Amino acid sequence: MTGPDFQDPGEPYRRALGIDGTAADAQDHPHPFIAAHGGFCVVCGLSESYSEHHKPGVPTADEVRRRVDAGTSWDVWVEFNDVDAAGLTVTYADLVRPGHGPYGVGAAVVAGDGEGNRCPAVVVGADGGRLTLRLDLGRFEAAG
């Protein structure tokens, strides 16, 4: 998905690192490798072997996760633009906040994004690392 409303899961990590811009912009900045679905870095989209992941003096992946976690009030990241009319959306287990989960079918969670939007949800499908959520769209909270 593309367009002005698209928010990717790497955005809060880039903000925590002081990187202004997209995953492509982050490729020019030293940062730790933070695994995303598919084994690529959530910050820059490249593999773990990319040289900018191994520069001295960058914060550890755990330090960056703590910075992101301190500024969030949700359990699992979702792309709200991908929610269907029934309130269903797919996300991935590696987009669950550190220290939360694992979540199985029936688990109540708070879905959120890097922009401060939140919505209660229930896990209705869990297949490997793929989670299907049913959002309670009547209780959606838009960012301030």
Image (cartoon, grey):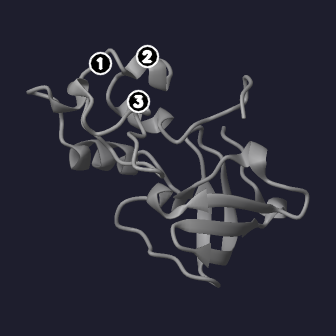
**Looking at the picture, which amino acid does disc 3 mark?**
Cys
Q: CA distance from mark 1 to mark 2?
A: 8 Å
Q: Is 30 placed left or right of 99 in the picture?
A: left
- Determine the image quadrant of residue 27: top left
| Residue assigned mark 2 | 25
**Looking at the picture, which amino acid does disc 1 mark?**
His
Q: Is 115 placed left or right of 53 in the picture?
A: right
Q: Disc 3 or 1, which lies upstream in sequence? A: 1
Mark 2 nearby-residue class (10 Å; few <14, some 14–19, many ≥20) = few
Mark 3 nearby-residue class (10 Å; few <14, some 14–19, many ≥20) = many
| Residue assigned mark 1 | 29
Residue at the image point whose x is 84% and y is 62% from the top: 138
Q: Where, quadrant-wise, is the N terminus in this rendering?
A: top right
Q: Where, quadrant-wise, is the C terminus in this rendering?
A: top right
Q: CA distance from mark 3 to mark 1?
A: 9 Å
From the top left corner, tell me how far across and down residue 40 is, in percent: 40, 42
Report the residue that reaches farthest toward the right: 85
Q: CA distance from mark 2 to mark 3?
A: 8 Å
Foreground of the two, 98 or 23? 23
Element under disc 1: loop
- Determine the image quadrant of residue 119: bottom right
From the top left corner, tell me how far across and down residue 22 is, in percent: 50, 22
From the top left corner, tell me how far across and down residue 21 is, in percent: 48, 18
From the top left corner, tell me how far across and down residue 124 is, in percent: 70, 77
38 in relation to 44, above or below: below
Element under disc 2: helix
Q: Is 65 placed left or right of 91 in the picture?
A: left
Q: Which mark is residue 44?
A: 3
